[in-house]
């Protein structure tokens, strides 16, 4: 999943993995010199489902992983921003889209890679896009036009399926699920 912590961020001494003496129940990276406990937490991936009428906006990746595959505009949340601010930033950076943010559509836990993915609805206000360097192209697709076999990530596929189901029902809900 990830590289374990090797050195204390506080003082630089090599950490040891053990259950801290503070009543914790999990092994943590603990500094034997300064007693700092280093917690490892999931990363938040935030993005949008940008839509215009019956179409959604997808971005063709210009970076690894999954170079050349299609995805929703999304990326890692930064410190100092809310989940919706991060989703909006990623949509501007990757698609150069103009939109109005709406509510949260999906939240997917992906414990295998230590991530939580959150996608917001975003109503496009224009069909003009200016993709950034991480995107080869940004394109609108109807459900029937989506290159389903070329979708980069399972979280994106699952979110798109829920989006189109909700659209057919005429009501958008919040979808939470775990991808094992």
Image (cartoon, helix red, strand yellow):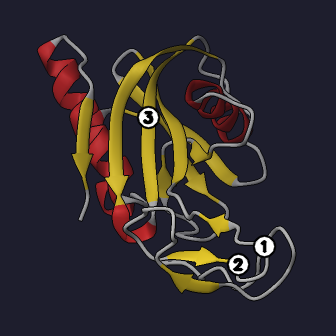
Asked if 3 appears above or below 38 in the picture, the reply is below
Q: Check if mark 3's residue and mark 2's residue have beta carbons within 8 Å.
A: no
Say which of marks 1 and 3 sits in front.
1
Q: Check if mark 1's residue and mark 2's residue have beta carbons within 8 Å.
A: yes
Asked if 80 appears above or below 177 in the picture, the reply is above
Q: Position of residue 20 (x, y in %)?
A: 52, 72
Answer with left or right where residue 53 lies relative to residue 90: left
Which residue is found at the position 53% from the left and 37% from the top? 47
Q: Position of residue 162 (x, y in %)?
A: 22, 35
Q: CA distance from mark 3 to mark 2?
A: 37 Å
The first of marks 3 and 2 along the sequence is 2
Which residue is found at the position 59% from the left and 32% from the top? 87
Assign a secondary structure to mark 3: strand
Asked if 34 appears above or below 158 in the picture, the reply is below
Which residue is found at the position 85% from the left and 80% from the top? 12
* Disc ID at residue 24: none
């Amino acid at each position: 999943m990830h590289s374990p912590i090797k050195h204390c961020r506080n003082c630089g001494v090599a950490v040891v993995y053990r259950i801290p003496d503070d009543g914790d129940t999990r092994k943590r990276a603990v500094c034997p010199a300064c007693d700092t406990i280093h917690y490892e937490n999931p990363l938040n991936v935030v993005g949008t489902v940008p839509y215009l009428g019956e179409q959604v906006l997808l971005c063709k990746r210009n970076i690894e992983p999954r170079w050349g595959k299609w995805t929703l505009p999304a990326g890692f949340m930064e410190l100092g921003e809310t989940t919706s601010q991060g989703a909006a930033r990623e949509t501007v950076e990757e698609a150069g889209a103009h939109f109005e943010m709406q509510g949260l559509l999906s939240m997917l836990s992906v414990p295998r890679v230590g991530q939580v993915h959150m996608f917001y609805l975003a109503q496009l206000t224009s069909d003009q896009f200016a993709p950034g360097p991480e995107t080869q192209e940004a394109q609108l697709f109807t459900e029937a036009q989506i290159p389903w076999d070329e979708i980069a990530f399972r979280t994106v596929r699952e979110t798109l399926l829920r989006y189109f189901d909700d659209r057919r029902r005429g009501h958008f809900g919040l979808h939470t699920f775990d991808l094992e």
